[in-house]
Structure formats: C-alpha cells, structure tokens
Amino acid sequence: MTEQELQKLRYPVGEFSPQKSYTDSDIKKFIATIEAFPAKLEDAVKNLTKEQLNAQYRPNGWTVSQVVHHVCDSHMNSMMRFKLALTEDVPTIKTYFEDRWAELEDYKSTPLDVSLNLLENLHKRWVILLKSLTRTIEKNSLSP
C-alpha cells in the first residue's frame, strides 16, 4: 500500500481546513451535524458482524469497535473542553493518549451499544448547550 493510499484511509474526508469566518447558517449546519451524528454512526455499525467489528480498517490501525469507543471518548472530551472554554478565563485543555486508551479493557469488552447510547445522550446535551449560545459580533465569538 502506498503512502498516499494510507493517508486516504487515515483521512477519508481530507484534513481539516478552517474557514476565515463562519456564518450563522454554517453554525446551524454544524450543530445539525452534531445532532445527527450518533444515529449515523449507529446505522453504520448496526449490521456488522463480530468479525467486521474486530477488523482493522487500515494496516496497523484500530478495529471498527475501537473506533466507536474512541469516538465516544473523544466527544466526551470535546464536550468538557467546550464547557471549560465557556466557563473559565484561561482554560487548560488537557490532552490524552488516544492510542493507550484504545488498548484499555473497556475498549475490548464493552458492548458497542453502551458507547452508542452514551454518545446519543451526550450529543443531546451538547446540542442543547450549543443552541443556547448567542454570537457576540464584536469578538466574533460565542457566549452563553
């Protein structure tokens, strides 16, 4: 497999490239994406066999199950980071070793439904929070 093919597997939708500014319409679309994501993820994995769930989607990559559990952990961290940014003057954003988390027992033995249900409810709360924010034009930022 070529390096270009590996990069395509690693970043199937391409690497993130931020816009210079975002419209209210953009923000509504982003929130709608966050709202719809848990159902889309569940639809993507609900009919997979155990073998498919335990398959690596790229060489030396995580299994599909590990990715689902990682998404749940990643989104929990994102929600906490978001709330820290909203409530602290100088929030400290702690990083974590995703690759080490993916090797912990909960990634190996927790049924996917647990992470999918957690993700669904987390996103419900996240969307409520996001929809409660208003844009502060002077700073081009969001505030509670």
Image (cartoon, rainbow, N blue to C red):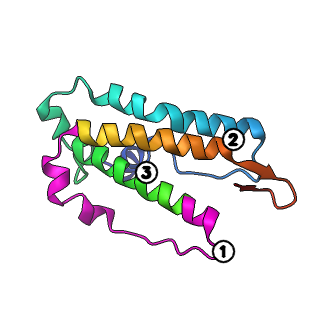
Q: Does the magenta segment cover residue 97?
A: yes
Q: Is residue 82 left or right of residue 38?
A: right
Kindly identify which residue carries mark 2: 27
Look at 18% across and 40% down and name the residue there: 111
Q: Amino acid at mark 1?
A: Asp
* Residue found 19% across the figure and 36% down from its top: 53
Q: Which residue is mark 3?
A: 75
Q: Nearer the viewer, mark 1 or mark 3?
A: 1
* Most distant residue in the top direction: 47
User: Foreground: 106 or 56?
Assistant: 106
Q: Quadrant of residue 60?
A: bottom left
Residues shaded magenta: 83-112
Element under disc 2: helix
Going by the numbered disc 2, the residue's amino acid type is Ile
Residue 125, image x and y in percent? 50, 43
- Which residue type carries mark 3? His
Q: CA distance from mark 1 to mark 3?
A: 22 Å
Query: Which residue is identified by label 1?
Result: 89
Label located before the other in sequence (2 or 3): 2
Q: Secondary structure at mark 1?
A: loop
